[in-house]
Image: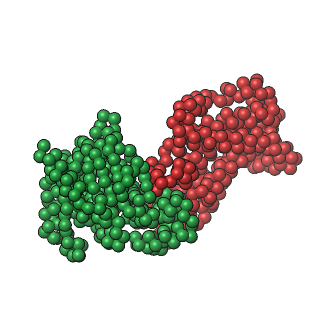
């Protein structure tokens, strides 16, 4: 999200502040419109450049340069430790996110549609969302041990409340006149839900899903750092303990990249398959 | 007092006229302690355009939604084609003030949505939708999305959708209030053509006196808090003349003035 927001700003700044000759300005604007990915690359290049400089100064002994981190990443991919780590980390993550998405959207939509379900369930999820979940993760270990169940549960605990509450809000904020429209043409309740309410709620449903998946990443990292050092959490802990800072940063940066790409992918799916009108702007 | 008596006589007049398609009997509507409508008795003639006109807060939109079956009345009864109704039905179609178009659907799907809900298969549905899209002057826009259209064009989609289900009665809730003045006039002229062409009954809600007088066969004036019928006026304007002539016509201007005199007491 951040990455797509900044190029637009750069574009605006170029378009308004600089009184360049019309042809150059128009050319630049056309370039910016046609090559949106160029601005993403530029934005990343600035970030990595700043990182490289900060590493070379150095701002801290424990802060590696970007290039060192990149080569450490290559090394870990080559020796297979990175791939093994992702194999372990992705299991509870995918499982937990799938469970949370399925039950979260289901429960949230039901709560949005029925006041009884809202009274029954909303307080539980409001409390769960407000609770500092990191403090509860050790309790999960206490009950479910250190296996896949405990880690999956940690993911669900963080992701589910966010998805439920956003889905519920999404359904509650559906345009009431669209619902009236469906009723006025004698749409059944099921048609109303599947042809009007869910499509109209889908932008907020997906926003909730994105937040939930981001929370799921937090959950899996908490589990791997607090319950048992496995997967990416283990890579981070291990390389920190032996002062291999470049490797530690490579592991941290890789999980951030995976998380960002997952969310960007989800946004792509949403705009390209569910809301065709958003493609034409 | 005099106003109540007037309403009574007008009510009697409407009862005697023939072939009512919609009958409104003793409708009252309360929201908690707030009385929105009190004792509404009305009949709507088949093939005519009747306007509900009044200041804001007179319950005209509420009355229209009660007729549509979207809002339940507290007491009273709505009859359509002689049968009492409690909910929406296939013989009535509603045009919404805010258009109520699905932003994720093309013009074609929006117009055919009423038919889609009834299970009409897609070839037949698109054929009917295309016909009405053309009739409201949107041919060529079938594959556009609502955000690509102007306010006036969006409401044409809303009107085409209501026509497509082939209802006897079209209920229009301030359909032109979100449309700018130039388009509004064009719209009113087009609406009169559609009334002529489709031979349907129109019930139209507006707060614009000129609009009401220009398009209506009959105007029902409502007074506010609680909403009651204060007068029924038949403008009887010769519609064979051109739109510009009608707008300069003395009898048109007299009716506008007469209604304004009746409503000015409610102006703030």
Q: Toward which corner of the image does residue A61 lie, by quadrant? A: top right
Q: Position of residue B146 (x, y in %)?
A: 47, 62
Q: Position of residue A71 (x, y in %)?
A: 80, 49
Is A128 positioned to the left or the right of A89 in the image?
Answer: left
Which residue lies most toward the left here?
B2
Residue B180: tell me if it is visible.
no
The answer to whether A67 is drawn above or below residue A161 in the figure is below
Residue at figure coordinates x 14%, y 67% from the top left: B251
The answer to whether A118 is drawn above or below residue B242 in the figure is above
Residue B195: tell me if it is visible.
yes
Chain that appears green: B
Residue at figure coordinates x 67%, y 33% from the top left: A157
Is A252 positioned to the left or the right of B8 in the image?
Answer: right
Q: Position of residue A208 (x, y in %)?
A: 59, 44
Residue at figure coordinates x 69%, y 46% from the top left: A259
The answer to whether B114 is drawn above or below residue A132 in the figure is below
Chain that appears red: A
The foreground one among B25 and A247 is B25
Residue at figure coordinates x 58%, y 32% from the top left: A121
Is A96 positioned to the left or the right of B107 in the image?
Answer: right
**What colour-coding does the image apply?**
by chain
The foreground one among A243 and A54 is A243
């Amino acid at each position: 999200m951040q990455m797509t927001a900044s190029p637009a700003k750069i574009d605006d700044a170029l378009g308004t502040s600089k009184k360049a000759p019309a042809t150059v300005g128009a050319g630049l604007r056309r370039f910016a419109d046609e090559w949106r990915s160029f601005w993403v690359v530029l934005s990343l290049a600035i970030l990595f450049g700043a990182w490289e400089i900060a590493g070379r100064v150095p701002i801290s002994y424990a802060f590696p340069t970007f290039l060192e981190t990149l080569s450490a990443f290559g090394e870990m991919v080559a020796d297979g430790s990175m791939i093994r780590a992702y194999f372990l980390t992705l299991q509870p993550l995918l499982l937990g996110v799938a469970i949370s998405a399925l039950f979260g959207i289901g429960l949230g939509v039901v709560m949005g549609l029925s006041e009884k379900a809202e009274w029954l369930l909303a307080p539980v999820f409001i409390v769960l969302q407000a609770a500092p979940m990191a403090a509860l993760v050790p309790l999960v270990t206490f009950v479910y041990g250190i296996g896949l169940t405990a880690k999956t549960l940690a993911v669900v605990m963080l992701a589910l409340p966010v998805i439920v509450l956003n889905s519920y809000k999404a359904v509650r904020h559906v345009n009431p006149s669209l619902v009236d429209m469906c009723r006025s043409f004698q749409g059944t309740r099921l048609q109303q839900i599947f042809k009007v309410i869910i499509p109209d709620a889908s932008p907020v449903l997906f926003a909730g899903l994105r937040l939930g998946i981001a929370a799921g990443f937090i959950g899996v990292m908490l589990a791997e750092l607090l319950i048992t050092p496995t997967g990416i959490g283990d890579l981070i802990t291990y390389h920190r303990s032996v002062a291999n800072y470049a490797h530690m940063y490579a592991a941290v940066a890789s999980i951030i990249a995976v998380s960002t790409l997952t969310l960007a992918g989800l946004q792509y799916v949403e705009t390209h398959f569910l809301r065709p009108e958003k493609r034409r702007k | 007092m005099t106003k109540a008596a007037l309403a009574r006589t007008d009510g009697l007049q409407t009862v005697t006229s023939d072939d009512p398609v919609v009958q409104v009997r003793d409708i009252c509507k309360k929201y908690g302690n707030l009385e929105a409508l009190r004792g509404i008795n009305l009949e709507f003639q088949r093939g005519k355009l009747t306007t509900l006109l009044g200041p804001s807060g007179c319950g005209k939109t509420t009355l229209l939604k009660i007729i549509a079956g979207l809002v339940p009345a507290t007491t009273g009864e709505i009859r359509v084609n002689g049968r009492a109704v409690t909910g929406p039905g296939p013989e009535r179609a509603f045009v919404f003030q805010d258009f109520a178009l699905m932003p994720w659907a093309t013009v074609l799907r929006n117009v055919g949505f009423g038919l889609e809900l009834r299970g009409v298969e897609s070839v037949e549905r698109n054929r009917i939708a295309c016909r009405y899209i053309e009739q409201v002057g949107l041919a060529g826009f079938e594959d556009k999305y609502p955000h690509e259209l102007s306010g006036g064009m969006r409401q044409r989609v809303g009107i085409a959708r209501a026509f497509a289900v082939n209802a006897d009665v079209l209920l229009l809730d301030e359909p032109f209030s979100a449309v700018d003045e130039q388009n509004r006039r064009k719209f009113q002229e087009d609406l009169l053509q559609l009334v002529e062409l489709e031979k349907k009954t129109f019930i139209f809600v507006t707060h614009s006196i000129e609009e009401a007088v220009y398009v209506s066969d009959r105007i029902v004036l409502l007074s506010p808090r609680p909403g009651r019928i204060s007068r029924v006026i038949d403008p009887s304007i010769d519609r064979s003349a051109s739109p510009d002539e009608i707008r300069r016509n003395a009898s048109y201007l007299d009716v506008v003035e007469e209604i304004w005199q009746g409503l000015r007491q409610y102006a703030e």
